[in-house]
Amino acid sequence: MSITRRGFLAGTAAAVAATASSPIQAADATPKRQSVLKLSSQAGVKGGVVPGASLDEKLAKMEKWGFDAVEVYRDAVGDEKTYLDAIGKTGLKVSAVCFGSMKGALVSELPEKRQEGKAALKQALDTAGQLGAVGVIYVPAFNGETKLTNQEIRQILLDTLPEIGEYAVKAKTRLLLEPLNRKEAFFLRQVADAASICRDCNNPGVCLMGDFYHMGIEETSDLGAFISAGDYLHHVHLASRTRVLPGQDERSFVDGFRGLKMIGYQDYCSFECGVRGDRDVEIPKSMAFLREQWAQASV
Amino acid sequence: MSITRRGFLAGTAAAVAATASSPIQAADATPKRQSVLKLSSQAGVKGGVVPGASLDEKLAKMEKWGFDAVEVYRDAVGDEKTYLDAIGKTGLKVSAVCFGSMKGALVSELPEKRQEGKAALKQALDTAGQLGAVGVIYVPAFNGETKLTNQEIRQILLDTLPEIGEYAVKAKTRLLLEPLNRKEAFFLRQVADAASICRDCNNPGVCLMGDFYHMGIEETSDLGAFISAGDYLHHVHLASRTRVLPGQDERSFVDGFRGLKMIGYQDYCSFECGVRGDRDVEIPKSMAFLREQWAQASV
C-alpha cells in the first residue's frame, strides 16, 4: 500500500547492507535431485497404523509389504533400546519421532514451563538421533494450550528454536514443525508459514513437515505449499481427506507428489491415519495406490 | 499428530456428506491459458510513480512507454469523472483502485466502525466498476488499527466479505485482499493465507493480489505463493527488494513470473515503488528489465 518516505530511506539502507548477505528467498524449487517415494508408517509397541500383536510382528509385516521406514511415537523417548533392538532385526529405517506439543510448554505464557519444554524437546532430539530419525515432529501448541497470541508465539519460537536447532544438528537430527488445521491449532496452519519461521530461524536443525490431511483443509494448493516448503521439508504425513488411508476417499495426492518431485524431496512419506476395513488388505492396497499417484505426478 | 476416535468418526461422517460437494483445493496450477505481461503503474492527479505536471501528462507518458493500464488511488472514489475523462483520451485501461484499510474499520473492535467500513468499501467498488478496474485493493488492518486478534479478524472477514464480494460482482469488479509484511500488518502476511480466506469465503468477488516487495520479506518462494494463489490472484504489485523499481537492486522476478505463467495469470503487474534516479530514464529501463525477466521465466 502507500509507501512512506521513512520506508524508502530504510529500504535504501537495507540495500547497502544486503550486498554481502544471501538472498531472502531460501526455498528453492529447482529440481536438483531425483525424488523417490519412500513409504513409512506409524507403529509403536502400543498402537500404530499397522496391525500386529507385538512391535516385532508389526515391523516384520511392514518389511514384507515394502515399507522403507517406521515412524515411532513419543514412548520411544527413554525406551530407545526396545525400538533399536526390534528395528535392528529388520531392514527398516526410522523416519521420524512423532512427539507432539508437550501441552504447549515451549510457548507457554509461563516462562518456567518454557524451560521444561526446551528440556523435553532436547531429550526427544537425543532419541531421534540415536534412532537415526530424520527429525522430531513438533507442534508448538494445540488450541487452548497457551494464552499467548499468534505474534507472541511466533516471537518465542524465533527466540528459542535456533538453540534447539543447534542441539538437533549436534544430535544428527532435526526439529520438524508441523502445521495442523485450525480445529486443532490456530497457530501454524499453513506450510508456507512454517517455512517462513524456518527461514527466519536460519538454522539447519529447524525444519518442517507437511501432512496431507491438514493441508487438505488449510492449503489451496498442495503443489504451492510444498514448493514454499522447499529444502525445509523433511517429512510428510499421509492421510486422505477424511483421515483414512490414501485411496479410501477421493483425495488426490498427485499435485502434492508433483511438488515433492519439483523440490527434489529425499525423505519419507508416512501413514498417520485410520483405516476403513481390514488393515492387512487395505494397507498394501493404499501403498499400491500411492505408487500409482506418484507415477502420475509429472514435472 | 495423534488422532482421536472422535476425529475418525467425524471424518467418516464428513466423507458421507462430501460426496456431493466440490473438491476442497480450489487453486488450480494447470496452465490453461497463455499469460502475457501486462504492465501498469500507479498514477494519480497527485503523486504516482510516473512523473508529470498533470494526470494527462502522466497518462500520455505511460501510453508512449508501452504501459497497458494505470492503477489509481483512492482519491478516484467520488472523482470518477476526472479519471474517466483523462484515461478516455488514451488507450490505457484501469488496472485497480488502490484503496487501503480505512484505518481497519471493517475489522474494528467497534461494530459501528465495521458498518462504516462496509459502506466505504462498497463505494470504492462502485468506483472500480465505473472505471472498469479489475478490483479494489484492500488491506484488513495495518498494525495498531484494530484491537482484535488474528482469529477474530479472520472470522469477521469470513462473516463480512461474502456480502462485499456479492456487491463487487454486481459492480463488475472484485475485492482484492493484499497481504503485507509483518512490519506493516501482522494480520495477512502471506499469499497462501489470503488464498485460504478467499477459498473459505467461496465468492467470485473475493479475490487477492500479491506484492513482490512484501513477498520478498514474507514468502520463501514466489513460485509457491503464486501457485497457492491460483485463480484467486487478480493483481500484482511490482517493487524491488528495497522497494524501488524492478532492476534497481538484485531482486529477481523470474521465479514469480514463472508462477504467473503456471497459473495462466490474465491481469496486470503494476508499479508501486520508489525510483532511484531520473524517472524518465529509469521507468522505461525497468519495463525492459521486466520483459527480459518474463522471457526468462520458463514453465
Image: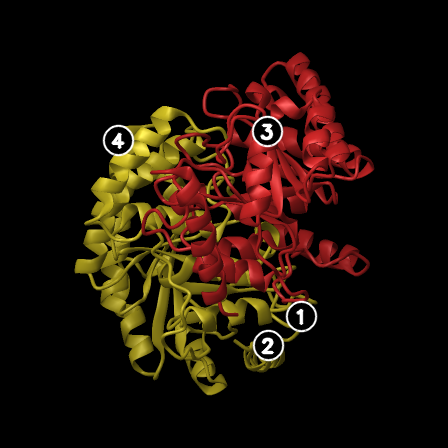
Chain colours: A red, B yellow
In this rendering, is residue B52 above or below A153?
below
**Residue A169, position in %: x, y?**
79, 39
Which residue corresponds to mark 1?
Answer: B248
Residue A236 disc label:
none
The type of residue carrying mark 3 is Leu
Could you say where residue A162 lies in the image, as x and y percent from the top left?
74, 36
In this figure, which residue is indicated by the disc labeled 4? B112
Query: For the residues marked 2 and 1, what is the alpha-carbon distance in whole angstroms?
Result: 8 Å
**Residue B199 in view:** yes
Q: Which mark is residue B286?
A: 2
Q: Give the amino acid at mark 1.
A: Gln
Residue at the spot x=58%, y=58% of the render? B221
Whether A40 is drawn above or below A11: the answer is above
Determine if marks 2 and 1 fall on one subunit.
yes
Q: Which of the 4 quarters of the picture holds residue B124? A: bottom left
Q: Is residue B158 left or right of residue A265?
A: left
Q: Which one is closest to the eye, mark 2 or mark 4?
A: 2
Q: CA distance from mark 4 to mark 3?
A: 61 Å
Q: CA distance from mark 1 to mark 3?
A: 61 Å
Earlier residue among tags 2 and 4: 4
* Disc 2 crowd, CA 10 A, few/some/many (<14, 14-19, 20+): some
